[in-house]
Amino acid sequence: MRIDLSEHQSGAWADILDAVPYKVIKVAAAVAKKKDPTQDEEEQANQVLLKTMVRAWNVKDAEGKEVKVPREATVDEIEMVDGFILSKIFTTVTQLVKSKVPDPNSGNASSPS
């Protein structure tokens, strides 16, 4: 699935997986189970989401340099990407993951094993 990010940066886009790999479901479910995850836990989950779900993108950093795809980029390189772009990617990926992962607090979910 391609996300158009050009409203935040000319020509920007990201290709994300349509299917959610088990690794992402497992991480998302673990964070969702916690009532108050730490910032480190949330950041680690976000890194897994980006590195696993974003397969390609055309995004530049604040200095106008192209940023490597998340699975090849460092945390510092990713942090140089416009926050609105990352927010749109996270929102899209989170909605996709939530559609695949039952809410563990609803009482209807089984834990991934």
Image (spheres, grey):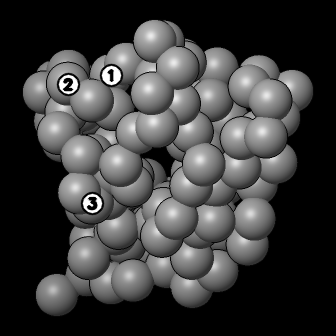
Element class at badge 2:
helix
Q: Give the residue drawn at x 67%, y 35%.
A: 88
Image coordinates for residue 39, horizontal then vertical, percent: 20, 21
Q: Give the residue drawn at x 60%, y 48%.
A: 58
Element class at badge 3:
loop
Q: Quadrant of residue 36?
A: top left
Q: CA distance from mark 2 to mark 1?
A: 5 Å
Q: Amino acid at mark 2?
A: Asp
User: Residue tagged by mark 3?
Assistant: 71
Left or right: 26 in relation to 80: left
Q: Give the residue drawn at x 64%, y 20%.
A: 84
Q: Check contact, mark 3 vs mark 2: CB within 8 A.
A: no
Q: Does 108 sit above or below residue 69?
A: below
Q: Quadrant of residue 78?
A: top left
Label disc, if present, on residue 76 of the rendered structure: 2
Q: Crowding at label 2, few (<14), some or many (≥20) Cα neighbours within 10 Å?
A: few
Q: Crowding at label 1, few (<14), some or many (≥20) Cα neighbours within 10 Å?
A: few
Q: Check contact, mark 2 vs mark 1: CB within 8 A.
A: yes
- Which of the marked residues, 3 or 2, is nearer the chain's N terminus? 3
Q: As drawn, which residue projects farthest toward the right?
A: 7
Left or right: 11 in relation to 36: right
Q: Is residue 99 visible in the rendered structure shown here?
A: yes
Viewer-side residue, 86 vs 92: 86
Left or right: 73 in relation to 7: left
Q: CA distance from mark 3 to mark 2?
A: 13 Å
Viewer-side residue, 99 vs 83: 83
Image coordinates for residue 25, horizontal then vertical, percent: 37, 72
User: Residue tagged by mark 1?
Assistant: 79
Q: Amino acid at mark 1?
A: Glu
